[in-house]
Image: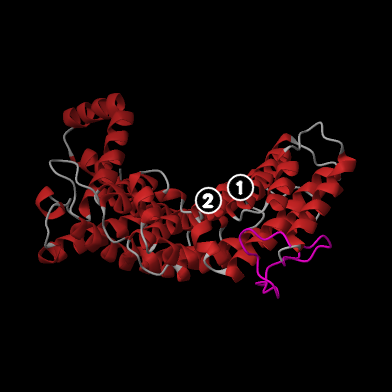
């Protein structure tokens, strides 16, 4: 406004009066226009939009300069002090990994995009202290990973960035990192590559955030492959001869998470999102059972960890935590032993599971101890010792006599 005032003073009096009249009538509108225009110009100044030809190209390396230029420009905008510029940059970085005109983006383009984005956003995470900027980075990482998984690109290009997000101390950033890790893990399974590194990072990250229910849920969703369990591809994957070998390395990490949660149930108070445990029942007893049954030590540890969890939940109900949520968790765990008893051809384990499956909010609390004792006795017959005294079950178990299908001795 100082320049306007100077021009005003230098102009003839008639022009001065006319200028003041215009400003008095249109000052608010003019101010808003100038503000919005400057924000939009700032947003447009960095990184020209990518064309459909680039996005559908099977040889995106020839467009590397344009792709990196776009990402670098929008990444710079992501660190702006202007919330509108940040918003537009975040939206653009997410949207431009897909093609919205004509055919879909090529997997090759999406792979190149993920590689360049990983580099750019990784630099922002190292340099930025602003929590809003860092959360925006995490949101972009997850949303782009989700779209690239869907489009067939190589999500593993984002793995270094996701690993950094999982190691962050801020809960909001870890949550989005956990969501993105789900995409990376699913991509590894679909690509028949080893997923152990990301699955172990999920566990180590969760140890620092066990009090956040939604992060626990996302960890379970990742380690039970929920992302790819909703389509024809997963059915094809399960029939693959390589499936047991691919899924096997993930199961110990899932069991580690269950063991951590068992300690929470044993501590007295109901942990956040108690219903999160329901997802593991079908996964371990049906989807993952071929891989589990092929490894006697893994089968033993699965039975132990699930037995420890089941009795921790049943004891909690016995002690007065008989909410509908807790009862549903107990029933889901009873269903696990009912199903896995069938898979093992073991009527004793199956019956113990059915007894727990029959628990309701009206069940007599005094009977809960008997349910745990029955499960403990039947698992003991196949060489598996479950803990009723608070031990974690976190370390792998190697009983002298492994659980064998059909054995009830």
Residues packed near mark 1 inside 10 Å, few (<14), some (14 to 19) or many (20 plus) = many
Q: Position of residue 218 (x, y in %)?
A: 53, 51
Residue at (11, 56) in percent of width and height: 57
Q: Position of residue 180 (x, y in %)?
A: 43, 56
Instruction: Tell me how many marks there are.
Output: 2
Any magenta on residue 386? yes
For mark 1, give the secondary structure. helix
The secondary structure that most of the magenta stretch takes on is loop
Looking at the image, which residue sits at the far right? 366
Q: Nearer the viewer, residue 200 or 27?
A: 200
Q: Nearer the viewer, residue 233 or 98?
A: 233
Q: Nearer the viewer, residue 112 or 274?
A: 274
* Image quarter of residue 209: bottom right
Reply above or below: 402 against 226.
below
The residue to which callout 2 is attached is 286
Part of the protein shown in magenta:
383-409
Q: Tell me, what colour scheme is on the image?
A: secondary structure
Q: Is residue 116 left or right of residue 82?
A: left
Can residue 214 be spotted in the picture? no
Reply above or below: 146 against 36.
below
Q: Position of residue 151 (x, y in %)?
A: 26, 50
Q: Nearer the viewer, residue 24 or 246?
A: 246
Q: Which quadrant is the C terminus positioned in?
A: bottom right
Any magenta on residue 215? no
Picture disc at residue 203? none
Residue at (74, 37) in percent of width and height: 358
The residue to which callout 1 is attached is 339
């Amino acid at each position: 406004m100082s320049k306007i005032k100077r021009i005003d003073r230098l102009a003839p009096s008639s022009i001065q009066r006319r200028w003041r009249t215009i400003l008095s009538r249109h000052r608010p509108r003019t101010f808003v226009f100038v503000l919005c225009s400057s924000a939009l110009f700032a947003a447009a100044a960095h990184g020209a939009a990518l064309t459909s030809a680039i996005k559908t190209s099977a040889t995106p390396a020839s467009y590397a300069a344009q792709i990196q230029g776009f990402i670098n420009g929008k990444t710079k905008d992501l660190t702006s002090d202007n919330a509108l510029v940040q918003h537009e940059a975040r939206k653009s970085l997410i949207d431009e990994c897909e093609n919205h005109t004509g055919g879909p983006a090529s997997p090759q383009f999406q792979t190149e995009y993920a590689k360049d984005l990983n580099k750019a956003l990784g630099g922002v995470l190292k340099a930025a202290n602003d929590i809003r900027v860092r959360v925006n980075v995490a949101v972009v990482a997850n949303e782009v990973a989700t779209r690239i998984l869907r489009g067939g690109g190589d999500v593993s290009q984002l793995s270094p960035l996701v690993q950094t997000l999982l190691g962050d101390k801020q809960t909001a950033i870890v949550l989005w990192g956990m969501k993105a890790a789900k995409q990376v893990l699913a991509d590894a399974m679909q690509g028949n590559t080893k997923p152990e590194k990301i699955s172990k990072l999920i566990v180590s990250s969760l140890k620092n955030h066990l009090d956040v229910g939604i992060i626990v849920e996302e960890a379970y969703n990742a380690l039970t492959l929920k992302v790819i369990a909703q389509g024809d591809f997963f059915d094809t994957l399960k029939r693959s001869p390589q499936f047991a070998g691919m899924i096997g390395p993930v199961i110990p990490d899932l069991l580690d998470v269950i063991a951590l949660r068992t300690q929470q149930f044993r501590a007295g108070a109901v942990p956040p999102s108690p219903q999160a445990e329901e997802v593991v029942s079908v996964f371990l007893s049906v989807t993952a059972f071929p891989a589990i049954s092929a490894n006697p030590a893994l089968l033993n540890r699965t039975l132990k960890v699930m037995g420890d969890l089941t009795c921790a939940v049943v004891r909690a109900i016995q002690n007065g935590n008989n909410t509908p949520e807790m009862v549903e968790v107990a029933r889901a765990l009873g269903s696990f032993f009912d199903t896995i008893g069938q898979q093992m051809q073991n009527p004793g384990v199956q019956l113990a599971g059915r007894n727990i499956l029959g628990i309701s909010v009206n069940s007599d609390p005094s009977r809960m101890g008997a349910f745990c004792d029955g499960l403990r006795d039947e698992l003991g017959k196949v060489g598996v010792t479950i803990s009723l005294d608070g031990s974690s079950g976190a370390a792998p178990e190697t009983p002298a006599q492994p659980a064998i299908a059909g054995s009830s001795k």
